[in-house]
Amino acid sequence: MANVVETIVNSLRYRGRDGQWAWMLHRVTGLGVVLFLLLHIFDIFLMAAGKETFEKFLDLYTAAPFRVAEAGLIFAVIYHALNGTRVIVVDFWPQAGRYQKTFWRIQLALSVFISVPAVFVTIKPVFGG
């Protein structure tokens, strides 16, 4: 029994390598996108409660915490899409697996590079811009 527990604990231990970062970020960004979609469905549902209620809720989106969350959402969507594409490439072309670390680093850099302008525009009003 101790052997089984030790095996489970060792398999769950985070080692911090690129593959685990890619795996974790893919799950976290996917969860973030799903949570946004649920919030979006809720705010559309509020249209049935009347225009005033709907617009009050939409005013929350201009608040600083929501702007920061929206910036995170921008990165999440871009990262999740590019990482999913990387996974598909590796799945369909097994020889590409030798370059996973390089592919992930390129994909992460692209995610940041593509996200920065959109994040800047999204957060700028928080700082009076």
Image (cartoon, helix red, strand yellow):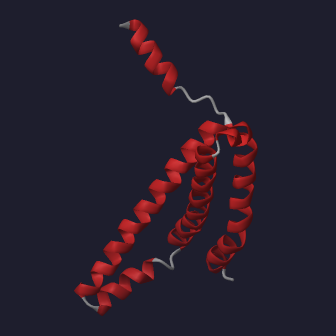
The front one of 122 and 14 is: 14
| Residue 33 at x, y percent in the picture | 47, 62
User: Looking at this view, is 82 or 61 the one in front?
Assistant: 82
Quarter assignment of residue 70: bottom right
Residue located 68% across and 60% down the image: 111
Is 64 on the left-hand or right-hand side of 82?
left
Occupied quadrant, residue 5: top left
Q: Is residue 106 left or right of residue 75?
A: right
In the picture as drawn, the residue positioned furthest to the top comes out as 2
Residue 10, position as x, y percentages in the image: 51, 19
Residue closest to the far left: 49
The C terminus: image quadrant:
bottom right
The reply, left or right, for residue 85 in relation to residue 32 is right
Residue 18 placement (x, y as % from top left) = 67, 38
The answer to which of 129 and 9 lies nearer the viewer is: 9
**In percent of the image, x 31 and y 91: which residue is there?**
52
| Quarter containing the N terminus | top left
User: Image point 53% across, 65% down: which residue?
Assistant: 69
Q: Is residue 15 above or below residue 88?
A: above
x and y percent of residue 30 in the render?
Answer: 48, 55
Q: Closest to the observer: 50 or 1?
A: 1
Q: Residue at x 63, y 73 (%)?
A: 123
Q: Please give the count of numbered marks on the rendered protein.
A: 0
The relative height of residue 29 versus residue 64 in the rendered view (above or below) is above
